[in-house]
Amino acid sequence: MRKISKDADHSLKLFMRGGLGNQLFQFSGALFYAKRFSAKLIVNETALVRHLDSSRQNWISRLNISSVTEKMEVAWETDKRMLRSFHGKSFQNIEEYELANLITLENNLSFRGWFQYSSYPTKLSIDRNAFSPLYIPENVLQQTIEIRKSPEVAGIHMRFGDFKGTSWGTLSKNWYEKAFRKLEENGVTYVHIFTDEIDVAREMISGISNKFSVEFPEAKRNLDPDALLWILRHYKTFVSSNSTLSWWASYLNLNEEPIIYCPWEENLFLAPWIKIE
């Protein structure tokens, strides 16, 4: 049997980065190991506070994390606002893969990582009611009410922006052709498309969405990531992009037996989601 230290005097420090979807994966991974070793968890948010891109701020702070952390206290810090209770403590830096192979916790450890595995939220038993917004604007609330009233409407998330030119890239027109075909087979005729680039999305679906009524709810203004995540979670039928926020919208879907179409590989795919190649 694996021997695991239960010394609560030791601490794990996560240096958080990225957008909301990545923040949720990192937080889940760090929390998993903190619970495994009964360690104190510190989240350093310096990279979010200093980031020039406003989409990379601390969005997770807008969500209710209490049902996930339960009675565990999570401390937040920046390099300029170090926690007094942790002054004088030294931290050994460790890689994500080393943390996964750790048997005992004998030092205070700090780490960065992406933790993009479905096993972390599932092992923590994070359910669909977790990570709800601490505050829901009236326009977002009304939109979710309308979505609840119209379960025949499918939600689609299309991510472009900074995904273009990356090693993982954006989903192809051929992929969306297959997705719309699946929606048609499922009797869907009305779709809401959420995207960071509406003109690109229109071009992507041109010629393949003729049988559908298409609406772009973000036509006037893009939603903040926390609001977008909350809205996407309400669609009974949802087409996920290859963004981590879209993964969480699928995982935290608020419906009983939602229909999720996705591109995810084995490390992130969950049954009974429907994978589109």
Image (spheres, rainbow, N blue to C red):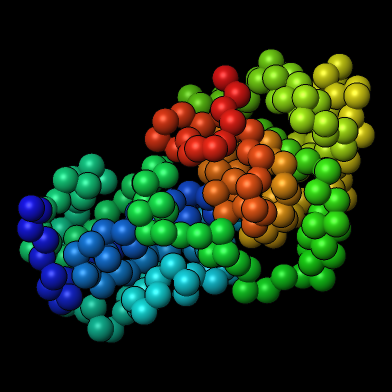
Where residue 229 sits in the image (x, y, percent)? 65, 54
Q: Which of 256 and 277 is in front in this view?
A: 256
Q: Is residue 17 visible?
A: no
The image shows residue 235, relative to residue 124, as above or below, that is above
Q: Position of residue 74 (x, y in %)?
A: 37, 74
Residue sitting at x 42%, y 64%: 45
Say which of 69 and 187 sits in front. 187
Q: Which residue lies furthest to the front in this view?
A: 257
Quarter of the C terminus within the rendering? top right
Q: Which residue is drawn at 26% across and 72% down?
A: 40
Q: Give left or right: position of 141 versus 258.
A: right
Quadrant of the rendered structure where residue 143 is? bottom right
| Left or right of 90 on screen, residue 165 | right
Q: Residue at x 85, y 57 (%)?
A: 149
Residue at image location 59% in from the left, 31% down from the top: 274
* Image coords of residue 165 (percent x, y): 57, 24
Q: In the picture, residue 263 is in which quadrant?
A: top right
Relative to 176, does residue 156 appear above or below in the rendering?
below
Q: Where is residue 103 in the image (x, y as percent from the top left)?
A: 11, 53
Q: How many marks?
A: 0
Query: Horizontally, is 243 left or right of 94 in the view?
Result: right
Inspect this view and state whether residue 236 appears.
Answer: yes
Left or right position of 141 against 39: right
